[in-house]
Image: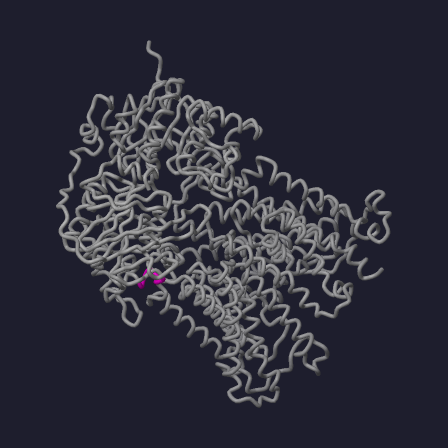
Amino acid sequence: MTQPALLTLAGVSKRYGKVQANKAIDLEVRSGSIHAVLGENGAGKSTLMKLIYGVERPDEGVIMWNGAPVAFNRPSDAQALGIGMVFQHFSLFETLNVVQNVSLMIPGRPQELAQKIKDLGEKFGLSVDPGAMVHTLSVGERQRVEIIRCLLLDPKLLILDEPTSVLPPQSVQLLFETLRKLQAAGTAILFISHKLEEIRALCDEATVLRGGAVTGRVDPRANDARALAQMMIGRDMPQVDAARANQPGDLRLQLKDLSHPRVSRFGTTLTDINLDLRAGQIVGIAGISGNGQQELAALISGETRAQAKDMVQIMGRGVGLLDAQQRRQLGFSFVPEERLGRGAIPEMSLADNSLLTAHRQDMLKGGFIKRQVERAFTRRCIEEFDVRTPGPDAEAGAMSGGNLQKFILGREIMLQPDVMLVSQPTWGVDIGAATAIRRRLIDMRAEGAAILVISEELEELFEICDSLHVLHEGHLSKPLVVSETTAEEVGAYMIGATV
Amino acid sequence: MSALEFLLAGTLAAALPLLLAALGEMVVEKTGLLNLGLEGMMAIGAAIAFICVYHTDAHSLGFLAAALVSAVLALIFAALVIVVQANQVAAGLAVGVLGLGLSALFGKSYESQTISGLEEIGLPVLSQIPVVGPTLLTQDIVVWLTLLGTVGLWYMLNKTKLGLIITAVGESAEAARAIGYPVGLIRTIAVAFGGAMCGLAGAYASTVYTPLWADGMIAGRGWIALALVVFGTWRTGRVVFGAILFGVLSLGELTAQAIGVAIPSQVLASLPYIVTILMLVAISRHQTRVG
Amino acid sequence: MKLRLIRRDAASRLAMFGAPVLALVLTCLTSLVLFAALGLPAGKALHALLLKPFLSWYSFSEVLLKMAPLLLIAQGLAIGFRANVFNIGAEGQFIIGALCASAFPVYFPDGNFPLMLLAMILAGGLGGMAFASIAAGLRTRFGASEILVTLMLSLIAVQILNYLLLGPWKDPRGFNFPQTVRFPENALLPLLFENVRPNISLIFALGGSLFAYLMMEKHFLGYQLRTAGLAPKAALYAGFSTPRMIWLTLALGGLAAGIAGASEVAGPLGQLQRSVSSGYGYAAIIVAYVGGLRPVGIVASSFLISVLYIGGDSATVSAGLPVAAVEVFQGMLLAFYLLTFTLIRFRIHFERGAAA
């Protein structure tokens, strides 16, 4: 008789309201293996992890630990068995220092904990200052704190949820080395990702999820990326035919020595940013989130005012001191990375969400709202941009991320902007919708619009941009022409090597 | 007794209800909530304690009952805000109005009755010091216990894991939940603690400070306590200092006599509120904790 | 136990009507039990509270009189609440409004002032507005929480009132009572009906309600305010000016409360007294919430709360109910409303397992 796997899931299902997040999932993780759970956004990976970590309980099915059924009521039950979890969005407290953060999960006196943190750091290549306040740490350092905190519980199984999404390419290699050391020390690792190459480089087993169900169980090293992608999305990876640039036209958006002190303790200071964006161009801004992307987007959109008028120029006018509405009047539009609560109001209907930025499209008379016009606009947006929804009265909060993104993008495109800023256009969007969105941006370029895209997805930027800059710790690199640069060069900028 | 001596003797007692209520609310706010119902929770505590002492003549029983009943009232706030996620401004006011109303309802047949207060205890040796000894250093047992408890609370908040957990929950409920802390439960306990402290504050006001029951006897002390938390910027030591300062001010005209200036008592009565507004302005420039 | 609120589809309309009704029923039932437990004639008390006000023209007219200030203040406050601007200091703005209006008859006790009434109402409204604007200025300039500032300002307003009534404004022939002279005839609001007390301030309140309805439900300004309340970042994204909204909502709230205060001294009181407000500013917050913060709902809830006040008065006589019972009833009503609103709007989903 073979030894049972460390962790076994048999027929595990979970439903949220109408959404079946996990369907009869079977999963086996053996001791000492690095097991990947692969799937695109919305495939049910996060829900599955919550079930394994005791954050949620399954509706059906059994979770077994060393062959014996277990029931977790809360994360501490899972921790007690030896399951540790590193979250995608860190669960660290910014106003506390590293030791205090660790002590919230691990018993022990501060001095002892500090020593243990140092020891573990040396052993696994996770160096971090135990006394440092968390808000002073970089994203990579925070992830190390998270991992150390888990390791102090001496886990048999370590779960990492999209750990590389916050790291530059070079740090990814460091993380992988750490994980291999852990594997060698006998820890099983459950690695959640949607990045195919990483999984092929690191993992020895993979379970592929699609639409909440398992679609494949493979050895990732024995399959090429294309085969994995097919399992992940159910068809071939769609391609965007990048009809390359027309001749760039007049200057639409210019950033001139744009500097801005960080707004909050946890923000990023922007320093001497220069950028030109012309008609018929798509320019990208690459970089890991948290290097000033949000600050920069808000300064361009007018949600934050710049310190001087000419630091931000739209259509040749200094707009640094104008608000978002005034900048829109000059032909600017903006798709923010947060859809619910910023790009759209969850509690309002789609029609009322059209009003948010499209109110100048003849929707008002003496300030009173013309409901007919509002609805007609919304219907047109739903049709033209293939938004799947019952109609203009549907609440924005009830829509899927991809559909809402199509609606917001559609609304902003229908304003016929001369210059548009799109931030993280395909975050949390399924591949089909993401492709449609990229095609749309390329079409707009063909029609002569100027588009600035801020994105973490390097592949995406390479696909649609004419040139790109890299943002690192508030500094913007010189422009790199996409057809002449490489991922390695961009990666070097992403860790600040040659800025 | 000179006005100054009077002030020395009376300040701590005047400050005590403010201090108790404010310390309770401080813990509530540290977990990230704001309960505006202090006035009502103090009132119901005052009524319950008075009724209890009136019938049993046992102050300890009165304080205990007041703490319990006010904590129960606070739990209504917790249920509304934590369980059904209602707006906390509205929920706090509901609890406040309810407490004020219930206190008047329960206390109606005790209106203008009196009971005996508590005897004052001088600190050994130290109370022999002239002027300060028989005034400042001779207080009732509740004052001494409260001062002791305040030190304990400071230690708990700043030196223990429980204090760390409270800070963590207040900073990011999301993150605290993610690493497995029962945020709702922790906040519920904090709210109940805040309520109990208000109950004690009310009990002190109605059975020790002025041992009689009258409708409306809390007279805005709940609001001052709320202001005090802001004034103290959520730090135990500063809240104590603020309570004493506001206690002095609440002695109004007496204070004016003591310092020998003829200021209208209304100006003195307004001072805590004005100071709090200034304090809000000063601290909000850097951070926004509430609202 | 772990619980989660799951939004029901299209239940907001039901919540708007259902929640207050259900809350009222629950409040009545709980009060019955409470009154009975206290040895009061519960049935009789409830009868007096809820039915008596409808049984005579006089008591019904008193309901209308009470309703005017509550309605006007609540409409002003609700506009702010929907934009997440929590002005809870209407009490102070009401008092300042009453003070400013009283200045005219106090200094011209013979009524020798042109357009006396108009001046009083204007002064009251502007006074309340200016007082509330202090909070707007501190919030927009320094980020000071308007919740606490408006509250503190209310407490200061009470002290200002006390100072004036005990000092410079005290009626010299008033037997040392803390109140001003009785106002001359031309400083009093015209009555709506003969022999009963409701005056044209009820028209102000209904006019204010219509204004609030048009602004909040039909106009882009209201849309901007609602956006700011529901999703502050969306308002910033669209470029709706937050400071302007804070100034606007606090100014409107102060204006409404100030006019209500002026109407009170120029109406049923006919002079400025220490008890000028009797808690209208706080009760109006309850009115605003129980009305679902919507202009139409607030008309209904202000009527309901006024019925409770007048009913409470008669219950003190007929059922020996203490005055405080009305407060208890109001507090319960708001608490139950907050509860039922969520229960109707959301489905509470309990999951097996221990502490959440």
The boundaries of the magenta stretch are A321-326
Point 30% across, 72% down: residue: A366
Q: Which quadrant holds residue C96?
A: bottom right
Query: Is residue C55 in view?
Result: no
The residue furthest front is: A498
Measured as percent of width and height from the top left, residue B59 is found at: 74, 46
> Residue A109, relative to residue C209: is it above or below?
above
Residue C252 lies in the magenta-colored region? no
Measured as percent of width and height from the top left, residue A422 is found at: 27, 50
Point 18% across, 41% down: residue: A483
Q: Toward the viewer: C126 or A320?
A: A320
Horizontal placement of B47 versus C298: left or right?
right
> Residue C349, relative to residue A53: is it above or below?
below
Horizontal placement of A409 versus A156: left or right?
left
User: Please, which colouring scheme is shown?
Assistant: one colour
Query: How many numbered markers are drawn?
Result: 0
The residue furthest top is: A1
Measured as percent of width and height from the top left, residue C148 is found at: 55, 59
Measured as percent of width and height from the top left, residue B176 is found at: 47, 38
> Residue C217, relative to residue C98: is it above or below?
above
Query: Is residue C295 in view?
Result: yes
Q: Toward the viewer: A127 or C170?
A: A127
Horizontal placement of A11 versus C127: left or right?
left
